[in-house]
Image (tube, rainbow, N blue to C red):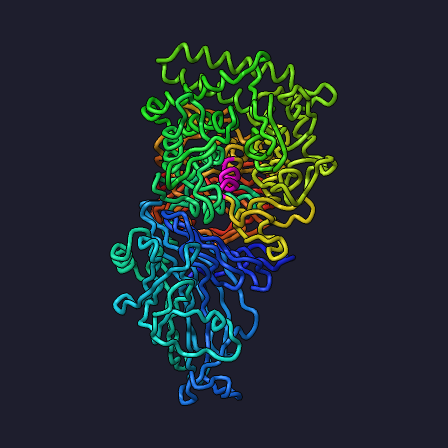
Amino acid sequence: MDQLGSQQTPADTMAKAMVTHVRHPRALPIYTMPETHFGMGASLGNGAVWVNTKSTGAIERVFSTELGVSLVGGISVRYAGTGNSLHPTWFGDAHPTSTTSYIPLGADTPGGFSIHPAYQRRTFSIASGVGVSETTFVPLGRPAPSGDRPLLYQAIELDNTDDVVHEIRIVGFALLRGALDDDVAARFVPNLRALVAHNKSRPEAVRIFGLTQSPTMYGTSFDFGSVYDPSHVHPLSNDTQACGDVLGCLQLDVVLQPGQRYPLCFVTGVFAHGEEDAIEAYRDQPEWKVALQDSVAYLQEILEASQVLTPDPQINRGVLWSKVNMRRVMSDYPQGRAFTNEPGVSSNVVCRDAAWFVYGNDHFMPGFSRALLDRFAAAQYPNGKLPEFYDAITGTVEDYGLNINDATPLFILAVNHHYRLTGDFHWLQAIYPSVAKAARYIREQTDDRHLVFCSARDPRGNVWAIAGWRNVMPLYTLNGAVTEINAECVAALRDAAHLAENLKTYPDDVVEFGKASDCIRTAMNDLLLNPDNGLYYLNIDADANTHTDVTGDEVFPVMFRVCDEETGFRIISRLNSPDFWTPAGLRTVSRNDPLYDPSTNVGLLGGVWPGLTWWYAFAAAHYHPEFMVEALRSSFEHYADNPKVNNTVPGQFSEWFDGESLINRGMRLSPWEPPRFLWAAVEGVCGLMLTPSLPRVHPIVPVTWKWIALRRLPYHGNELTYFATREAGEFKIYATGEIESDHPVERYEEDVSGGILLFSDNAAVVALRRPGETIILVGNVGPQTTTVPLNIREIVETHAAYEIDTYNSERDAWESSERAHGEDVSALAISIETHGFRMIRLRRVESA
C-alpha cells in the first residue's frame, strides 16, 4: 500500500527500464522504477513555484514565479547513525571526542522511485533495518492557480523494522543564495522552527527553510563539503553569523524504538514581499499530510475533465498525464495567469505557445485559456499585430522586428476555438475588436500575389529572421511567402469571418475576411505547390528563391484545411516514410535532407518533437486513423521507455529527442507539448468537432477498434459524456447531451460512471442514465481477453426488477434478455475480447 492507501499492482511493464505503470482502479496512476533506472527527477510546479529534482531525490532549485528567479538552489537531506571513528585525530579540537559521533548512512541497496501526478517518492533503507520514504511535492488546490502556496514539502517517514533501537541524525542542507547575489543573511526563528533568509540587496526576496519538528541544531555555513563527507556528520553550531553564498542547515536527532515509525518534513517557502509577509504566510501553511491529501483529492477531481477512454492504454495514460503536466505549468504572475515558455528559467509568455495551449487546455481548464487570450488581447499592438511574447513580470512586449509570424493568426484561431468550446457570446463580443484588428493586419501583409509575405532579412537568422514555429535556429532564415504562415492565415481569416457571422453585427467583416481567406488559399495552391511532387514548398523567400525542402511543416496545410483531399493524403503518406518516422515520433526534417542535424539547432533540423508528432496525428486522422494512433502512442510511450538512457521522466512531456539516439535534449517538461496531445486525442481520436451550437461527433479510429469514450467534456457551460460503439459494422453514439452526428444517436441525461466500482486495470467503464434506463459500457484496454469484475450497486435499486440486455462485441449482437432484481446483478464479472466491449442495458420494470 502507498501512503494514501492505494494498492499497487502492475498494469504495464516497460521491459527495457523496468518501469511499471501502477493504476488502482479508483486512484491516480503511479509510475514506479528502481532508482538505478532514473536519470533525472520530476519537475513539480504550481501557481507560485517551480521545482526541479535530481535523480538522487535531492532538489535542484526552487524558482519563485512572482520574482522570476530561483531563490533556493540545491536542497539535500543526509542521514547518519551513531558510531565512533577509528581515526579520532580527524576531528581535531573542533569536535570533542566526548560528543556522540554520527557516521553517514547511505542506502543499503538501490531503492525505488515512484512518480505520481501529485508527488515524487523515493524509498530505500539505511542501517539494514530502517526504511526511509521521501515524498517531494508542491501543494495544489483551488482557487487555481492563484491559491497555490509558494511552498515545497519534503516529507520523510522513518520506519524501524529492526529489533534494536536506532539513533538517527537527519540533516537538511539548502543553498540559500539561489540565483541572486551572494549577500544572503539568515536568522533562526524558534516559533517557526525555521531559518528565515533574505538578500541584503533585495530584502523583499525571502526564503524560509524549516522543519515540522523543532530542530535539534541549526546554522548557516560555508562548509559545502559537509553535505557529502563520507566520514562523519558533525552536529551543527546554532550559529547563523555566516552570510553570503551560504548553506542553511537544520539538524534533527531522533531515537527510533523497534517497530516505531517517525514522520517529519522539511518545508521550504519562497516569498516576494519581505520578511513580515513571508513569516505570516509560512506560519499559515497546512500540515504536510493534509496538504498532500488535499493535493491528491484536487487532482482526482480536475483530472476527470475530458477523460479519454480507448482500447489503447498508452493513449488513455497520455491524456491523463497531459492534464497533469498542463496543471503544473499554470502560474500566477504579476501580469496575470499564464505559463512561461521555459518554466523555472524564463518569464516570457509566448503567443504561439499560448494559442496552442488553448487548443488542448479548453478541454481541461477553459478558465485558464480565457486568461491567456484576454491578456494577449491587451498586449496587442495598435496596428493589430500580436507580439511574439510579453514578460509576465514587467509586461514588456517583443516582436523581434518581424512584420508577420504565426502569433497573429494563431491568436485568432485560439479565440475561435475557445468561443466554440464555451459558447460564451458576451465574451466574443468583448474580444472581437482584437480579432478584427488582427485579421485586417494579416490582410495588409499580403503581396501582389495575394500571399502573406514576411520581409525579415536579419543576417543573424534565428528569431529575427524566421517566420514560423521553428524560429530558434542561428544563421537560418525563413522569410517571404512561407507555407506554414500562409496556411495559418487562411484558417485565421476564415475563422474571423465565422466569428463575425456569429455576432451578426459585422456583415462587412464576414465578406472582407472570407474573401481574403479564399484569395490566400487560392494563391497558395497556385504558387506554393510543387508540381514535381505535389507537396508544398517550404517557402518562396524574400529574394524570390523557391525552397523545395519537405519538412514536418507540411502538416499545416492539412490541419488547416487548405489543401484538397488528394494533396492531404499525399502529405500524410510522405511524412509516414522511414526517413521521417522513428519509434519516438516524427522528425522535423527528412533524415536524407542535406541540412539534417539530429542533435543541434534545438532539434528543428532533424530532431523529434512530440508536438509535431501530435499535429501529424490530428492531420492524419481523416486519412489514416492507424497513423494517428501510432503517432500518439509511440511518442508518449517513449517518455517511459528506458528513462535513464533517454533522459526522460515517465509521464512527463519532455521537449525534443535527438533524431538518431532518441535521447531527450530539451526541457525535461515542455509546457507546449501536453495540450497538443489532449487536443489530438479529443478532436482526433474521439471525433469531436466544436461548433457555435451543438457539438458534432464523428469518431475516426482504426478498423480494429470497436469502441471509444469521452467523459465529462466541458462544453457550453455544461458537461458532455458520450461513447461510440461499433454495432453491425457501424458506429452508434450514446450521449448525455444533444449532439449532431452522421451516426445514430441515443440521448441520455446524466453520467453515472462514478457509481461503478471497477476491479480491473485492463478495462474502462462508462455508465449513462435516463428515466427508467441505464446503459453501461465496459471496454477492454488490455492486450488480451480479460475478465472484468465490477460492482454496480450504487446505480441500481437492489429491490427493483430490471430487464437486462447485453451486447457482445465479439458476436456483434445483442444477446437474449433476462429479468433480475438489482441485488442479483449488483456484482458482475464480464469476459471481453481484445479491443472489444460489452454493453449492459438495464430497464426498470414492474415486478411480475
Query: On the rendered structure, is 488 left or right of 377?
Result: right
Q: Is residue 780 visible?
A: yes
Q: Describe residue 703's horizontal placement relative to residue 673 as left or right.
A: right
**Numbered-mark total:** 0
Q: Nearer the viewer, residue 610 or 398?
A: 398
Q: Is residue 98 left or right of residue 486?
A: left
Residue at 45% over, 42% down: 340
- Does the stretch in magenta take in 746? no
Where is residue 829 drawn, in percent x and y? 50, 51
What stretch of residues is rendered in magenta? Answer: 671-679
Quadrant where the image shows the C terminus: top left
- Which sits in the foreground, 598 or 394? 394
> In the rendered structure, does residue 676 fall within the stretch colored magenta?
yes
Image coords of residue 169 (percent x, y): 42, 77
The answer to whether one can see residue 827 in this image is: no
> Is the residue 260 above or below the residue 821 in the image?
below
Q: Is residue 811 left or right of residue 158?
A: right
Q: Position of residue 285 (x, y in %)?
A: 29, 58
Quadrant assignment, res 61: bottom left
Helix, strand or loop: magenta stretch: helix
> How far from the left and from the top, in percent, is residue 311?
56, 43
Placement of the N terminus among the 4 image quadrants: bottom left
Q: Residue at x 73, y 23 (%)?
A: 533
